[in-house]
Amino acid sequence: MSETPRRVHFVAIGGSGMGSLACLLRARGLQVTGSDNALYPPMSTALERWEIPVRDSFRAEHVLDAEPDLVVIGNAVHADNPEARAAIDEGLRCLSFPDALFELAMAARHSVVISG
């Protein structure tokens, strides 16, 4: 696991998983930004409550202006997404949502699962 980032930008922050992880990281004191094409309640309400700034489109400058230590790229994001492309081209550290969830929320914990 790498050092915990201070600034994280989420590309496609509006989904339930990405938005929830963004709120968790904000609750831990990290600086969080994000972007998506459309946001709807309840996620838009949660992001607003946690004072996470969200841009309503995908543009390279959104990720570059945020100066993130880490960029989390949503699973539905295509390779030609301007923010994902800019993050990769600039050599920023990028993780998929599942990898970010594991590294930032689960790696240091022991899971107990009960089913039945």
Image (cartoon, rainbow, N blue to C red):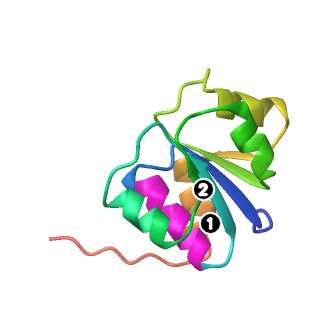
**Relative to 11, residue 47 above or below:** below
Q: Which residue is mark 2?
A: 100
Q: Along the line of sight, which residue is nearer the eye, 112 or 58?
A: 58
Dots 1, 2 in contact, CB < 8 A:
yes
Going by the numbered disc 1, the residue's amino acid type is Leu
Q: What residue appears at the point 59 percent right and 58 percent down from the top-left corner?
A: 53
Residue extending farthest to the top is 80
- Region in magenta: 17-27
Q: Main secondary structure of the magenta part?
A: helix
Going by the numbered disc 2, the residue's amino acid type is Ala
**Relative to 61, residue 115 above or below:** below
Q: Which mark is residue 79?
A: none
**Relative to 54, residue 78 above or below:** above
Residue extending farthest to the right is 90
Q: Which residue is mark 1?
A: 104
Query: Whole-percent x and y of residue 43?
Result: 38, 59
